[in-house]
Image (cartoon, helix red, strand yellow):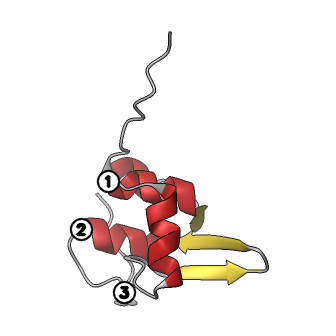
Amino acid sequence: MGNSVTAVPTLAQVRDWPATVDVTTAAKALGISRSKYYELVRLNQAPAKTLPLGGVTRVITASLIRVLEGGDPADERVPRSS
């Protein structure tokens, strides 16, 4: 039987992600569930900036990186590379 626990990606791995990712991927990086992230989006409390695109919500990777670095997700500066 396979292991149902999914590894949390490292910050270095997140830095290699595309400009936006789906909510499931972003939630995994933060160690929370997809449903919890969607709840936070609905309450306007998402930890990273999101883009509602029709019926799809994308998370901006640069904003997610800032959160993972302990910074302000609204900071528009380009995240530093490793």
**Contact between labelled residues 3 and 2, with CB atoms less than 8 Å apart:** no
Front residue of 72 and 52: 52
Query: Which residue is most to the right?
Result: 54
* Residue 69, disc: 2
Classify the position of the C terminus by image quarter.
bottom left
**Contact between labelled residues 2 and 1, with CB atoms less than 8 Å apart:** yes
Is residue 70 found left or right of 19 in the rendered image? left
For image coordinates 47% across by 53% down, the residue present is 16
**SS at mark 1 in the image:** helix
Q: Disc 3 marks which amino acid?
A: Arg
Is residue 52 found left or right of 34 in the rendered image? right
For image coordinates 59% across by 68% down, the residue present is 20
Q: Within 10 angstroms of label 3, few (less than 14), some, or many (20 or more) residues?
A: few
Residue 17 visible somewhere in the drawing: no
Nearest to the eye among marks 2 and 3: give it. Answer: 2
Q: CA distance from mark 2 to mark 3?
A: 13 Å
**SS at mark 2 in the image:** loop
* Residue 11, disc: 1
Q: How far across and down, in percent of the image, does residue 38 sit?
A: 53, 70
Residue bearing mark 3: 77
Q: How far across and down, in percent of the image, does residue 50 sit?
A: 54, 79
Compare marks 1 and 2 and give the one earlier in the sequence. 1
